[in-house]
Amino acid sequence: MRLDLPDPDSGDWREVLPHDGSALLSEKWIDHSEADTVLARLMEEVPWQSHDLVLFGKRMAEPRLSAWVADDDVSYTYSGVRRVPATWTPTLTELRHRCESTLASRFRGVAFNSVLANLYRSGDDSMGWHADDEPELGPKPIIASLSFGDERRFDFRHRSSGETVRVYLPHGSFLVMSGETQTHWKHCLARTKKSRSPRVNLTYRFVLPRHVSMT
Ligand SMILES: O=C(O)CCC(=O)C(=O)O
């Protein structure tokens, strides 16, 4: 695959949050035809699984398929469930390096050791309000979020003012959340009647290795 990706300090990126953190969006990080190839590979390579969550005391299947992929020394608890990581696939590895090289000029030394992959099979699949604020992500995590497939709306809601920000994440887009974003804002991917075809989202993260404990 090509490596002429837009740098986050170039005009291809825009800031979507007004304050209290940063979310930079490049709508065309990867061009359309290459994004088609990536989507086809991800659908095939990633070990997609249905996971359960417990909501109001009831166990139910999450409204999406997902896979947690990470280096060997990484463990992660998500939605109260400790995830055992799957191994890296060629496409996930390549995208990990491409994210790191795109972000290197803005975030010196940035490195990811894991990715949460989500497959939204249709507009009925979704992700509820949450922040990526688990202690193992550290205080100001950089979350690199790639989207392939159907365009979906992604909402932010400020935790204290209730202010909302709405963005659309097209095929081949890259959203980078950093700074205090996870402290001040929650985000979600709502259900929609408009979307019928699948969407894959990858959020690359750096999870502090097991032996490091946060105070
Ligand atoms: O699918 C998306 O764009 C959102 C994913 C997300 O919020 C997450 O993985 O924490």
Image (spheres, grey):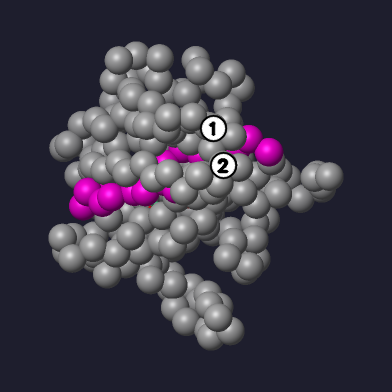
Q: Which residue lies furthest to the bottom in this view?
A: 58
Q: At x 62% / y 69%, what residue is drawn?
A: 81
Main secondary structure of the magenta stretch: strand
Q: What is the three-letter code of the residue carrying label 1? A: Asp
Instruction: Report the Cα–Cα distance between label 2 and label 1.
Output: 6 Å
The answer, for residue 94, to whether it is visible in the render is no
Instruction: For label 1, count other residues whose C-alpha is less than 10 Å away and answer few (under 14), some (14-19) or many (20+).
Output: few
The residue that disc 1 covers is 20
Identify which residue, 26 or 71, lies in the foreground. Answer: 26
The secondary element bearing badge 2 is classed as helix
Left or right: 201, with 215 as reference point: left
Instruction: For label 2, count other residues whose C-alpha is less than 10 Å away and answer few (under 14), some (14-19) or many (20+).
Output: some
Residue 169 vs 197, above or below: the answer is above
Residue 11 lies in the magenta-colored region: no
Identify which residue, 82 or 9, lies in the foreground. Answer: 9
Residue 169 lies in quadrant? top left
Pick whichever of labels 2 and 1 is earlier in the sequence.
Answer: 1
